Image: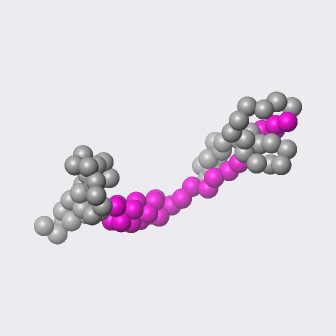
C-alpha cells in the first residue's frame, strides 16, 4: 500500500455516482479512489476545535465528547499546573 494514500474500492453507476443500492452488476463498475492522508497536527486541531465547540451544550451526564474535552484539557494543561 502506498503510504501517501488510502485506497477504497467504490461501486459506481454509469454516471460515476457512488451507488448505495443493489442494481444489476452489468450497470456498475468498480473504481479505486485515493484519499490523501491529513497531517496529524491538522487532525488534532480539528478535534480540539470540535470539542471546544461541543462544550457547554446540554448533554447527558455520561456524554463521551464532554469526557474527551475534560481529558484533553487535563493533558494539555498538565505542564502548567
Q: Is residue 25 left or right of residue 70?
A: right
The answer to whether one can see residue 75 in this image is no
* Residue drawn where x is 24% and y is 54% of the image: 71
* Residue drawn where x is 24% and y is 46% of the image: 62
Where 45 sits versus 32, above or below? below
Q: Is residue 39 left or right of residue 48?
A: right
Where 38 sits versus 64, above or below? below
Q: Residue furthest bottom?
A: 80
Residue nearest the viewer, comparing 23 with 76: 23
Q: Is residue 50 left or right of residue 57?
A: right
Query: Measured from the top left, where is residue 34 in percent x and y?
Result: 68, 50
The answer to which quarter of the image holds residue 19 is top right
* Residue drawn where x is 63% and y is 52% of the image: 35
The magenta stretch spans which residues? 27-54
Q: Residue furthest front?
A: 58
Query: Measured from the top left, where is residue 51 in percent x and y?
Result: 34, 61
Where 57 sits versus 61, above or below? below
The answer to whether one can see residue 46 in this image is yes
Residue 28 sits inside the magenta stretch? yes
Query: Measured from the top left, where is residue 55 in percent x and y?
Result: 29, 62
Q: Is residue 29 left or right of residue 76?
A: right
Query: Measured from the top left, where is residue 77 in percent x and y?
Result: 21, 65
Residue 69 sits inside the magenta stretch? no
The answer to which quarter of the image holds residue 22 is top right
Quick one: quadrant of the C terminus?
bottom left
Where 33 sits versus 28, above or below? below
Quick one: quadrant of the N terminus?
top right
Amino acid at each position: 500500500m502506498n503510504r501517501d494514500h488510502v485506497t477504497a474500492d467504490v461501486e459506481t453507476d454509469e454516471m460515476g455516482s457512488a451507488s448505495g443500492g443493489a442494481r444489476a452488476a452489468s450497470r456498475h463498475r468498480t473504481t479505486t479512489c485515493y484519499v490523501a492522508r491529513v497531517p496529524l497536527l491538522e487532525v488534532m486541531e480539528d478535534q480540539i476545535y470540535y470539542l471546544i465547540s461541543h462544550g457547554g451544550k446540554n448533554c447527558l451526564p455520561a456524554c463521551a465528547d464532554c469526557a474527551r474535552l475534560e481529558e484533553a484539557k487535563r493533558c494539555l494543561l498538565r505542564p502548567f499546573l
